[in-house]
Structure formats: structure tokens, C-alpha cells
Amino acid sequence: MANILIVDDVAENLQILQLILRNEGHKVFAAISAEVALRIVTEHLPDLIISDIKMPQMSGLEFCKELKESAGTAQIPIIFVSAQSDTDNIVAALEVGGVDYITKPLKPAEVIARVNTQLKVIEAHKLAVRQHLSHVMNQMVVGVAHEINTPLGTAITAVTHFESILNELRSAFDNQTLSAEQLSVGFEDSQESVGLCERSLVRVAKFVKMLKEIAQVERPSCPRDINVNEFCEKLKERWNNESVKLELHIYAHMLKADDEVLSTVIDNLISNSLAHGNLHGSKPITIEFNKAEHGVQITYYDHGQGLQNLTVEELLKPFVTTKRGNAGHVGLSASVTANLISNALYGSYQIFEQGRGLEWVIEIPSEAG
């Protein structure tokens, strides 16, 4: 069943709607005004809202506009309640983003039918998202399996070559024909083979790590209260050993999210900046945590070279990378990061180039799920 918020300045209307909806098994939150409703939305993000149009101070139309301006609440469907003769307001309600309307006096059968219609639309959308995500994930897994074959094959060839060098040196040593020149050349060839094997296996390890991150999208999310100051301290500790300059600005001290997933998202952004950003040595990677109307906004920018002939759409495609073939660059991080934000953190993101390098603006809602 769904979490439904009802908003009406007439207590009797709230009572009627509560009885109708609770009888259908829904969890109902009630607000006597739009202002109260906005506070409830920040604490208990509803699946659906039923709101009266005419209310004092903030009308239902203004309430709807307020919700549509925030990425965290813009997708909540709103059914409006209006008097049967209030045609102009009904049209205005649909124009500001309402999905349906119910006329007064309230009829239980009509309320249930219109609510069920919207809940079916929500489920259909969730199913479509899951199917699309599953398709994307399958493409990624198939792509990863294909990409692993190349470095793995290279590593096997390098090991085989290394073994043949050792056999030749051992044979020459046993026959007492081993010369200093042959030993020197053998050592050089061995080092080259070992290096090639190591680089290839590092690349395989990168893909395995990415597979684990893909799996994070599918696993159940475990949101909890995160102390942003403590989270940032751990972030700095992880990257201090890499000599990465981080500048952290904390204006929101608590957020609710899966901390493991959020760490993966931030780490991926930093890794991508280091790999592709051509960062200016004097400027640090900057991360800001700001309060948003319905959660926390994380702004990330790296002062680097930006997308460099890539569009945002291309950036988010699997296996797109500016350094293909390098052991450190597998071309999946941006795509996985975007999916983690949307589907494991229940958030939203935007990507910009505004003179500060590549910039991600991530909004995490105050209540996920």
C-alpha cells in the first residue's frame, strides 16, 4: 500500500479522506494547510498527494509549484480536490503539474478509483525504470566480461613468455653456457613481462571493482543518518595517501543516505577527475554540502579540463573513456555513478561545465525510498 499525504483546510474533508484511504490499507498523513504539508513532505516523502485547491495563505496551486521546483519532490503525483463548478481552477491545477482532480462532494468510489489509477501509473513507471536499469546493467556486465578478456589474455601471454625466459636461463645455467649478456637481456625481458602482466591484472582488478559497484545499484539500499563532518574526515583520510588536494565546505551537517554508496559515488568522481581531468596543481577538488529545501545538495567540481569533446550523454554511456587501454581507466565510472545516485541514493544529479571544470550537482532527499 502507499503513503498518501492529504491537504485541506477543512477538518471534515480530511477526516472523510482519511477514512476512505485507510479503509483501503494506505498510510495517510494529514495536513490542515500547505505550510504544514511542506514540513510533512520533508520528513515523510509521500508516494501521492491529494490537495485542496482553495486554501488560505498558500493555495494548492502554489503548494504544487513549490514541490515541482525541487528535484526531490517534483515527481510526486498530485491529485487536486475542487468544487464541481470550479472549472477554471481545475484547468490551472493541471497546468501547474497536477495529474488528476476529484470534485466535491467526495464520493468514496471516485476517490479510490482515481487514487488506484495514479498508483498503477507509479508502479508502471517503477517497473519501466527497473527494466531499463536491468537492461543497462546486463549490457554493462556483458561489456565488462568482453573487456576483461583482453587484459587477461595479455597477462597469460606475458606469464607464458616470462616462463620461457626462465627456462632458457635455467637451461643455459645447467649447461654452464650462461653469459653475463644473456643474463642481463633475460632480466630485462623478464621485467618487461612482469610489468605487462601487472598492468593487465590491475586492469582486471579495476573491472572487478566496478562489477561490485554495479551490484550496489541492485542491492537493497540502507539509508541512515550520516554526520557530514565525520563522513568528510574519512573521505580525507582515504585520499591523503594519494596526495589529492580536497577542499570541503560543510553547510549541512546531517544527511540521510546509504553511506557506503555515497562513499563510492564521491570516490568515483575523484578517481575520474584524477584520471581524465588534467587537474591544475594549484587548485583543489572542491566538494560542498549545502542544505536544500527537501534534503542536501552536494556540489562537486575539480577545476580540471572538463569533458573535452564529450557530451554529457556520451559521458554517461558505458565504456566511454578518454584514455581507453590504460590500466586505470575502464570507462564505466560515470555511468555507474549516475545509476548509484538515481537508484541507490534515490537522488538526482546534473552535470555542468561552468569554468570550474567538470561539475556534478547531486541532491539527496531527506527521506529516501
Image: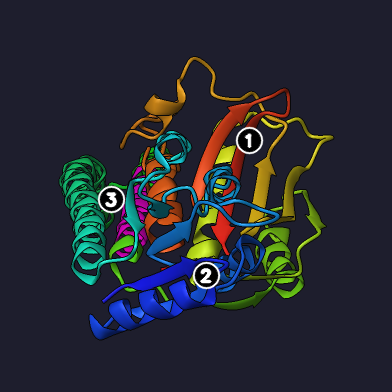
Q: Nearer the viewer, mark 2 or mark 1?
A: 2
In the picture, measured across the screen, residue 222 lies left or right of residue 19, that is: right
Three-letter amino acid code at the position of disc 1: Glu
Q: Which mark is residue 359?
A: 1
In the picture, measured across the screen, residue 284 lies left or right of residue 241, that is: right
Q: At numbered mark 2, what does the secondary structure look like: helix, strand or loop? A: loop
Residue position for label 2? 367
In the picture, measured across the screen, residue 11 lies left or right of residue 246, that is: left
Residue nearest the viewer, comparing 72 with 53: 53
Q: In which quadrant will I find the C terminus?
A: bottom left
- Tell me if label 3 and label 1 are in contact, CB under 8 Å: no
Q: At numbered mark 1, what does the secondary structure look like: helix, strand or loop? A: strand
Precedes in sequence: disc 2 or disc 3: 3
* Label 3, residues with CA under 10 Å away: few <14, some 14-19, many ≥20: some
Q: Which residues are magenta?
A: 194-215
Q: CA distance from mark 2 to mark 3?
A: 66 Å
The residue depicted at 31 percent of the width and 37 percent of the height is 318
Q: Nearer the viewer, mark 2 or mark 3?
A: 2
Residue position for label 3? 169
Q: CA distance from mark 3 to mark 1?
A: 54 Å
Image coordinates for residue 16, horizontal then vertical, percent: 38, 77
Q: Where is residue 285, by image quadrant?
A: top right
The residue depicted at 47 percent of the width and 40 percent of the height is 89
Q: Main secondary structure of the magenta part?
A: helix
In this view, the residue farthest toward the front is 85
